[in-house]
Image (cartoon, coloured by chain):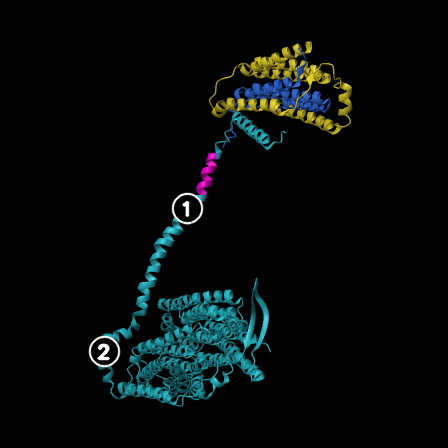
Chain colours: A blue, B cyan, C yellow
Amino acid sequence: MGHVPLSWYLILSAILFALGVAGFVYRKSVITVFMSIELMLNAVNLTFIAFSYELHRIDGHIFSFFVMVVAAAEAAVGLAIILTIFKNRGTLQIDEVDSLKL
Amino acid sequence: MNLWLIPFFPLIGFALNGILGRRVSKQLISVIGVGTVAASFLYVVAILLKLSPLNTAYSEHYFTWIQSGFLQVGFDLVIDRLTSVMLLVVTGVGLLIHIYSIGYMAEDSGYYRFFSFLNLFMFFMLILVLASNLLLLFVGWEGVGLSSYLLVSFYFHEDWVTNAGNKAFIVNRIGDFGFTLGILLTVVTFHTLDFGKMATAVGTMPAEVGFGTLTVLTLLLFAGATGKSAQIPLFVWLPDAMAGPTPVSALIHAATMVTAGVYMIARLSFLYDHAPVAMSFVAVVGLITAVMAATIGMAQNDIKRVFAYSTISQLGYMFLGLGVGAYSAGIFHLMTHAFFKALLFLGAGSVIHGLSGEQDLRHMGGLRKAMPITFWTLGAACLAISGFPGFSGFFSKDAILSAAYTHAPWMFWIGAITAGITAFYVFRAYFLAFFGEYRGHHHAHESPPVMTLPLIVLAVLSIGGGYINVPTWLSPAFPLSEHENVTAMVISASFGILGIIIAAIMYVFRPGLAESFKNAMGPLYTLVLNKYYVDEFYQAAIVKPLEGISRTFLWRGVDEGLIDTGLVNGLGRVVRDWGSMFRRYQSGSIRNYATLILAGSLLVIFVFILAGSTR
Amino acid sequence: MIDSWIFIICAIVAVVCGFNLVLQKHPIASALSLIGVMGSLAVLYLLLGAEFLAMAQMIVYGGAVMVLFVFVIMLLNAGTEKASTKSWFAQILGLPLLLCFVGLLAYLVWGVLPPLRDVDFGSWVGGTAQHIGELLFTTYLLPFEVISVLILIAILGAVVLARREIE
C-alpha cells in the first residue's frame, strides 16, 4: 500500500470532533461533558497539524501548541468550578444545574 | 412711515390690559384701552395726510414669513384708497365705541378683560385690512373670529352665552374651510398669494383656463365670506352673538368684523370681474339674505335681535352691490352702515343700560322723555337706515339699487321692497321703545356723557356721512357708473317713507292694529318669529347625524376598536406573545444550548458554502 | 509502507476510544478512553512530522490534564449517570443535527478541498523543537507572553475556586 492521503487525517479529525459533540450533547455527567470538550480540542489540533504538514509550514504547530496550553488551563479552572458546583448543589448532573432559566 | 404701528398700538393695549389689568385701577385700564386705539386712529390720519392723494398704493415689507418652493409669503402691509376708507372706519368707529364702553361696562368685574379682548380684536381687524397678501388677510380673518368668540362669551357664567360663542366660532370655521380651500387653489393657480402679483397674473391668464378655475376660487372665497359676514347659509350665528355686551355687537357684529367679507371681495375685485357666474351668485345670495333677514326682523321682540337681523339684511345689500359690479357702492354702504348701525346698537345699549338690563321691546315705551339724547340720535340712525332722503343711508343704498337696476331690474324691485321692510321694522322698534306708555318695571334714566357723546358724533356722521364722496375717491380702482338713475332714487326713497308711515300707524296712532294683524297672519307670523326654523333644520339635518356618526363610528369603531384595541393593545399583545415564545429557549439546560449552538454553526457553514467562500 | 499501517491502527484505536468515551456510563471509563485517544493522537502527530507536539501532547494532556480528571473523579466520587428527561430538545434533535454536521464536513473534505499531498513519514523534518522555538520566540512572542499570563490567571482561579471555605 502506498502512502496515506492527507484527507484521511482530516476525516479522522472530523469523526473525532463529531464524537466530541455527541458526547457533549448526550452525556449527563459534568465530568464526561468536559472530557468531550477535550476530545473536540484534540480533533482540532489534529486538523491543524495535518494542514501544517500540507503547507510545510510550522505555524500550524504553534497554533496547536497554544490550543494545548489553553485547553490545559481551561481544564484546571473548569474542574475547580465542577468542585464548587458539587459542593453547592450536591449533584453532578448537568440537567440539575439549570437555575439560570427564564 | 411705519405702517406696522397701526395694528401694533392695540396689540400693546391687549398685552398690557391682559397682563396687568387685574391689578390696576379702572381709570388706567380705560386710558390704555382707549388710548391705544386713539393713537392708532391719529396715526392713520397722519399717514393718510402725508400720503394723499394716494394715487398709487404704498406698501411696506417687513420679513418673509414663508419661503417654500415657489411660494413666498411675506409680512407685507399696504395702503391704497380702499384701505384708507376701511382704516378710517375701523379706527374711527372703533375709537368711539371704546369711549362708549367706558360708560357701558363701568360696573362689570371683567372690565380689564373686556378692553383687552377689544384691543385684540382691533389688532386683528387692522391686520386684515392692511394685509397685502391673502394669507395675512386670513390671519386677521381668523383672529377677528377668535376675538369675536372671546367677546361673545364675555358673560361666560351662563351656559347659553358660551353656547352662542361656540356657535359663532364654529359656524365661522365652516366658512373658513371654504376660504382655506380658496387659498390653496390660489396657491396652485397663481403660485403666489400677493394681491398685486395676483392682479397682474389674472390679466395675462387665458380666458378658458381662467373661467372655470376663477369661478371655483371666487366661490370658495365667498363661502368664507358667508360665514364671516353672516349670509345664507351661515348667518345663524349672528343673532345668537347678541349674547355679548352691546359695544361688542356694535363694533364687531355691525361695523367691522362682519364687513370683512365685503372688504375681501372688494379687494379681490380683479378676480371677481373675471368670474361673472360667481358675481351673479354673490348678488343673488346677498339679495335673498337681505329679504329673508328683513322679514324675520319684523317679528322679533328683543331690540338687539331686531338690529342683528338688520345687520344681516344690510350686509346682503352690500353683497348685492358687489355682485352687480358696483364695488364702490358696496364699500360706500359699508361705511355709512358702520355709522348708523353702530349708532343703532350703541343707542340700544344706552336704552338697555338706562333700563338696567331690559332688552324686550314689549317692556319698553315712552322713553323719549326720560332719555332725550338717545331718542334724537337713535332717530337719526333709523332715518339713515331707512334711506330717508338727505341722510347717509339714502346715498349709499341708492348707489347700490341703481347699479342693481342697470344689471337686472327684478333685483332692483326686490331690493326696493326690502328697503321698505327695513324702514318698517326699524321704526317699529323705535316707536315701540320711545313712544306710547311705559310698559316696564325699572326706572329709566339717561346715560352718562361718556356714552352719549359717541352717540352724538355717530349721529352727525349718519346724517352727513353720505356727502363723503367715497365712490369718487375709489374710482381709480372701481370705475364709476355712467349716470344717476333718478327714477330709481325716487322709487326706493318712497318705499322707505311708506315703511315709516305704516310703522307709525301701527305702533303710534293705532296700537291695537299690530295685534290684530299678527293674529290675522297666524302661521306666517309664527314662521317668521321662529326665523323660518333654520336653526332647527340645521340641528336635525346636520348636527344630529354628525353627532351620531361621531359617537358610533368614530368613537366606538375607530378610536376604541381600531386604535385602542387593534394598534395599541395589539402591539402589546404581539410583544408579549412573541416574548413568551422566545422565552422558552432560555431553559437553563446546557445541553439544549449546546444543541442550539450546533444548529447555528451548521447554518453558518451552510451559508458559507452557498455563498461560495469555500472556492 | 509501515507508516500507513501505523496510521490505520492508531486511527482505529482513536475512533474506538472515542466511541467508548461517548457510550460508557461511568466517568472513569470515559477518562481512560480519553487517555487512549490522546495516545493514538500523539502517534499520529509523530507520523505527520510534529515531533515536539507529539511529546507535548503526551506530557501535557496525558500526563497532566488526564491525571487531573482522574483525581477529580476520585474526589467527587462520581458515580454512574442517571437518566434524565429534562433536555428533551437535545435528546431529540442532537443526532440528526450531528449527522448533518458530519455530512457537511464530509462534503467539505471531499468536494471542496483541492487535492492534498500524501503523508510520507520522514519527508518533512520541519517540526523539531528548534523550529518551533525559533518561531515561538520571534514571530509569536506576544501570544507566548500573553499565554503565560493566562496560565497564571488560571492557576489563581483554580486556587480560589477550590479553596475550602473559612469556617
Q: Which mark is residue B521?
A: 2
Q: Main secondary structure of the magenta part?
A: helix
Classify mark 2: residues with Cα within 10 Å, few (<14), some (14-19) or many (20+).
Answer: few
Classify mark 1: residues with Cα within 10 Å, few (<14), some (14-19) or many (20+).
Answer: some
Whether labels 2 and 1 belong to a single chain: the reply is yes
Residue A80 at x, y percent in the picture: 61, 22
- Mark 2–mark 1 contact, CB under 8 Å? no
Would residue B532 appear left or right of C77 to someone viewing this image? Answer: left
Residue B478 at x, y percent in the picture: 48, 81
Tell me: residue A94, above or below residue A3. below
Q: Which mark is residue B26?
A: none
Residue extent of the magenta highlight: B572-581
Kindly indicate the quadrant of the structure image that contains residue B239.
bottom left
Residue B113 at x, y percent in the picture: 46, 71
Q: CA distance from mark 2 to mark 1?
A: 61 Å
Disc 1 residue type?
Gly
- Residue lying at 32% horizontally and 63% vertically, measured from the top left: B541
Question: For the residue labelled by badge 2, is the local secondary structure a helix, a strand or a loop?
Answer: helix
Which of disc 1 and disc 2 is earlier in sequence? 2
Residue sitting nearer the eye, C155 or C6: C6
- Residue lying at 43% horizontally and 65% vertically, measured from the top left: B177
Residue B128 at x, y percent in the picture: 50, 73
Would residue B383 appear left or right of A86 to someone viewing this image? Answer: left
Question: For the residue labelled by badge 1, is the local secondary structure a helix, a strand or a loop?
Answer: helix
Kindly indicate the quadrant of the structure image that contains residue B56.
bottom right
Disc 2 residue type?
Met
Residue sitting nearer the eye, B225 or B22: B225
